[in-house]
Each structure stands twice: as C-alpha cells, then as structure tokens.
Image (spheres, helix red, strand yellow):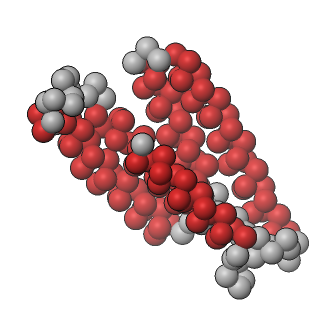
Amino acid sequence: MFLQIFFFITNLIGWWRWANPKQGEENKKQELKVSLMSTRWLIVFAIISLVATLAFGATAKNLHEFFPTLFSKPSAFPYLDSFVTVLSIGATYLMVQKKAECWAVWLLTDAIATYLYFAKGIKFVGIEYLVFCFIAAFGLWNWVEEFKNYSKKV
C-alpha cells in the first residue's frame, strides 16, 4: 500500500518535472528532454540498489520473527522481492528525471517479477509482468531513438 502511495506522489512530481524543465533541459515542445546517466551515476545507482536490496531483504527474511502475528510464515523470496521493490523505486526516480536507463531497469525488474509470480503460482500476474517486459523494451528503444535524434538536429 505504501508503495502505491509513493508511486502516486512520484507520478505527480514526474508530471511537474516533465512539464517544467530547467533551462537547457527542454526539447522543442518545451518538455524535459530524454537524457542518459553518466557512468558515475550508473555505478552509484547500482551500489545504492544493492545495499538497499540487502537491507530490505534481511528485514523481509525476518518479518515472521519480528511480527509473528502478521506473518506466520517466512518470506519465500525475501531478496528477490526486495530487489524488485528497490528497482521499482529506482526506476521511478529515473523516469521522473527522464533518464533512458529507467526502461532498462524496468525491463530487469519486470523480468524478475515475471519469474517470481510464476514461481509463486500466480500465473495471471506473471503474464501481466511479461507484457510489462515488452512495454519496457519498447520504451527503452523509443527513448534511445529520441535521444539520438537530439544530436542529429543540432
């Protein structure tokens, strides 16, 4: 539930950020341009994602011990579930900034979520996430093409 609240708030922030870019960040439509992350920020993003996944995974692994009334069984996939959650948050942040890499992160996230839902026997949701993989692949291709077109028009 808290994740859905986060996504709602970041969608509003993203809408504002895309509609009101800083000077020099706008395209011909006066919207935020697609950009790429620097190698340094990719490394920072990866490290933060790894540390957050390990922290959330360790917590999720022990939820049944911390709150036995709420969680009667241990988590089946604490680290993979945490990885999907952390990458979903990271991909959303990158999308707000209109970084093309957000789609690669979504593709990885959706692929892992597809596996998790099929492994848990929740096939309909697994199929949904498989469709999300194709959407993310198309989004990545589309934004990379848009980014390439900026340099062609200069």
Q: Quadrant of the C terminus?
A: bottom right
Residue located 61% across and 34% down the image: 133
Foreground: 66 or 120?
Answer: 66
Residue drawn at 71 percent across, 85 percent down: 23
Question: Residue placed farthest to the front in the image?
Answer: 69
Q: Is residue 34 above or below residue 6?
A: below
Q: Position of residue 25 (x, y in %)?
A: 70, 77
Classify residue 8 as left or right of residue 70.
right
Q: Is residue 75 visible?
A: yes
Q: How many marks?
A: 0
In the rendered image, residue 59, in percent from the top left (x then y), is placed at 21, 43
Q: Could you tell whether 112 is left or right of 97 in the image?
A: left
User: Whole-percent x and y of residue 51?
Assistant: 29, 54
Q: Is residue 102 left or right of residue 84?
A: right
Q: As drawn, which residue projects farthest toward the left?
A: 65
Tell me which corner region of the image, top left, top right, bottom left or bottom right, holds residue 28. Answer: bottom right
